[in-house]
Amino acid sequence: MSGFIHLSLIYNNFDRISTYVDSDPLEYVLANTATHLDEEHHSTIPYLSTSNVTYPLTIQRLELESCPLTPPRLVGPIRVWMDAPTFSSLEKLYPYLENGGHGQPKDCKSRHRQLSYRIVIVNLIYLMNVGFVESMKLYPWQCFIFHDVDLLPEDDRNLYSCPTIPRHMSVAVDKFNYQLPYTAIFGGISAMTVEHLQSINGFSNRYWGWGGEDDDLADRVSTVGYKIARYPAEIARYKMIKHVHEEKSNPINKCRYKLMARTKKEWKNDGLNSLEYKVLKVELLPLYTHILVDLLENKERPKIRHAFNC
């Protein structure tokens, strides 16, 4: 399990239509339209609950027209600032966000970069499943973006949306000279629909420590029969925040190779259907939703070490 926190960006009101092989022509992606679910939306505020938390979530009004097919104000390449802003400055910059980091356009129905979305903070892999399950209790989201927080986008044409097959979004990263390290890579930032995640049984719950989890996910995607969609490298560009691996706080997973060798045989029994955890707290903060859980590590981690002798 990586020591880096991930952001899971989740949103609704999308229909994915496109034909993809290894890269996504931009004109196909921009053909997304609002789904039939929009017809069921109304102006009332339903009360949704997760665990012991109940709170209102504003639904977009039915009479709103859909946002433009081509998002306005896209500029292409953007300058990346490496200095992290404070949370207080971000709260001032985005005062319209509802508690829990829920945002949506006010004058049109969401699609493309004009999203109805929520940001949920979790840790890597094991908690990705938790983030997915708990987020679906908040709202019937359609698309999930699993995002390393150390990757900063360099081009706003790299639309955060879900095509008909899983998308690998961080195609060209400065650390790797803006080239794919290997063709099967699916780590960094990935976009998947609810159907994709359910088809691959989510993420593995076996990875404690650093390494192997991204390749496990890629194996699940390929084993089910999905191809991986990618934008062209000149668009899907990212800068990586420099950091060093801290072995003490996030030791290398000595079981990773043994675990990966069994992925294709055992993925159906390791994932969403084998997830065990206990929710301790759900915080609806101004910019994001923070979910604190007990992963039952003292119970689960020894099982892995014993089973794989590592």
Image (cartoon, helix red, strand yellow):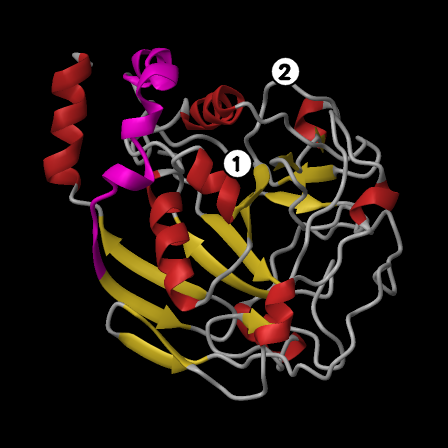
Q: Which of the numbered marks, if any, corresponds to residue 112?
A: none
Q: Quadrant of residue 254?
A: top left
Report if residue 12 is visible in the image: yes
Q: Which residue is mark 1?
A: 243
Question: Where does the image place residue 139, in percent across and percent down from the top left?
Answer: 46, 67
Residue 15 in the image: above or below residue 163: below
| In the displayed structure image, the side of residue 208 where residue 12 appears, left or right | right
Quadrant of image for the C terminus:
top left
Characterize the local packing of mark 1: few (<14), some (14-19) or many (20 or more) Cα atoms within 10 angstroms: few
What residue range appears in magenta? Answer: 255-279
Q: Which residue is mark 2?
A: 182
Give the mark nearer the N terminus: 1 vs 2.
Answer: 2
Question: Where does the image place residue 66, in percent across and percent down from the top left?
Answer: 77, 71
Quadrant of image for the N terminus:
top left
> Which residue does the image show at 82% across and 51% down from the upper left?
30
In depth, the one of 197 and 205 nearer the eye is: 197
Of helix, strand and loop, which one carries label 2?
loop
In depth, the one of 126 and 16 nearer the eye is: 16
Report if residue 89 is visible in the image: no
In depth, the one of 162 and 145 nearer the eye is: 162
